[in-house]
Image (cartoon, helix red, strand yellow):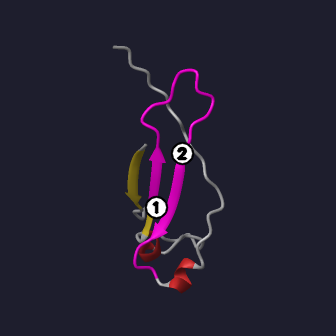
Amino acid sequence: MNNYLVSSTPSGSKKDKNRIPADVLSSIQVLVSVPDYVGLDGKEVSIAIRLRTKDLPEEECMKLQLTDVSLDLVQNEQYQ
């Protein structure tokens, strides 16, 4: 498995009242584990997605809610 860590960066309009505050968003990290290899005949792909906060007060953490997750998978084959 390959592991990736992505930190959030605020962008877009600041006028949206439902927008997550920049200080909260910048403390969210996404950890993703994906396989190195999936066979051509494979029917399933195991992917682990974890969210964590860095130095965010507990009362702010309790306000966070993940409502939707979507993935865009691209398969590339190599022949050697």
Mark 1 vs 2, N-terminal side:
1
The residue furthest left is 80
Q: Position of residue 11 (x, y in %)?
A: 43, 62
The residue furthest top is 80
Amino acid marked by disc 1: Gly
- Depth check: give the residue in front, 20 or 53: 53
Compared with 28, 71 (above or below) is above
**Placement of the N terminus among the 4 image quadrants:** top left
Q: CA distance from mark 1 to mark 2?
A: 28 Å
Amino acid marked by disc 2: Ile
Residue ID at (55%, 70%) = 19
Compared with 47, 22 (above or below) is below
Q: Mark 2 highlights which residue?
A: 47
Residue ID at (47%, 43%) = 34
Q: Is residue 5 left or right of residue 69?
A: left
Q: Which residues are magenta?
A: 30-56
Circle 2 packing at 10 Å, graded few (<14), some (14-19), many (20+), is few
Which type of secondary structure does the marked residue at label 1 adopt? loop
> Pointers 1 and 2 in contact (CB under 8 A)?
no
Compared with 22, 12 (above or below) is above
Q: Position of residue 74 (x, y in %)?
A: 50, 31
Q: Is residue 61 left or right of residue 11?
A: right
> Is 42 inside the magenta-drawn segment?
yes
**Placement of the C terminus among the 4 image quadrants:** top left
> Is 35 inside the magenta-drawn segment?
yes
Residue ID at (50%, 63%) = 51
